[in-house]
Amino acid sequence: MKLPECFIVLFVFCLAFIIPTVVSANPQTILLVSGTNTQSAGYTSAQPSNPLDISSYSIGGWSSATAVAPISWTWYDPTQAPFGSGATWVSSAATTEDGQDDQWRLFKIDFDIPAGSIINSAQLSYTADNAATVYLNDIEISSTGSVYGASPTPYPYDPSLYLFLNYYNVNFNPKIGSNTLKFVVRNWYNANNYNPTGLLYKGIIEYEPGTAVPEFPSAILPATMIIGFLGAVLLIQRTREH
């Protein structure tokens, strides 16, 4: 093999390492499910004037939510679609605090979308006992209704108000970088003091990461350019000599 051909072969060989780095990575998925990653600010028996203010709630900060066992004859079964994927009913405590009053609870989950990504879709499915309003970065995006104001009806409840037997879907638009989903859950008054409460949700975000360039090509890129340049010069010179 003659000298110009050697440079050309080396040039192509180096390109074989560089070209794959400019190809976009495979689509990625972020899965958000109710569980120990969910944070709770506690509860309050007085409707908060600012429901997203953590100082309005009993903990006054953030703590891991507590998994609570579903009540099979009332609560939505978390093994059914669109839940599953490890989503479990959660609350601020294993037992209902102040069960004879209306209560409000605040929950959140944080997530990040890498810089340079392209978001393809984001969907949230959720339900709660008794009702919930959802916020993305402190802006309301969905609600079952009946979270604020007077309770729809005193005990015994109208079965049509068992909102937790249903699930609710919403498409949402997270931003690149840090995001937070918050849930304000209301539990209605129950005169029998048997008043379980909980939140169940699953979110799926699909995105394409930005171009990822490993470190090693940056070291060989100048050498690749020099090799290619010398190969081209020698090839041109050889052509002129003929």
Image (cartoon, rainbow, N blue to C red):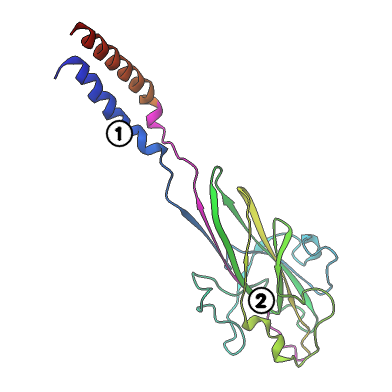
Q: Of the residues shown, which amino acid type is indicated by label 1? A: Ala
The residue closer to the viewer here, 126 or 103, is 126
Give the magenta range. 192-218
Where's the N terminus, which quadrant? top left
The image shows residue 146, relative to residue 139, as above or below, that is below
**Image position, residue 99 (x, y; %):** 75, 82
The residue singled out by tag 2 in the image is 128
Q: Quadrant of residue 131?
A: bottom right
Q: Quadrant of residue 213?
A: top left
Residue in the picture at 45% in, 53% down: 27
The image shows residue 17, relative to residue 41, as above or below, that is above
**Image position, residue 215 (x, y; %):** 41, 32
**Residue 198 in sight in this render:** no
The answer to whether 187 appears left or right of 117 in the picture is right
The residue closer to the viewer here, 130 or 7, is 7
Where's the C terminus, which quadrant? top left
Q: Looking at this view, name the residue that lies furthest to the top.
A: 241
The answer to whether 160 appears left or right of 220 in the picture is right
Residue in the picture at 83% in, 71% down: 47
> How many numbered marks, from 0 up?
2
Q: Do the residues labelled 2 and 1 touch (CB within 8 Å)?
A: no
Residue in the picture at 31% in, 20% down: 228
The residue singled out by tag 1 in the image is 16
Q: Earlier in the sequence, mark 2 or mark 1?
A: 1
The image shows residue 23, relative to residue 144, as above or below, that is above
Q: Of the residues shown, which amino acid type is indicated by label 2? A: Ala
Element type where label 2 sits in the image: strand
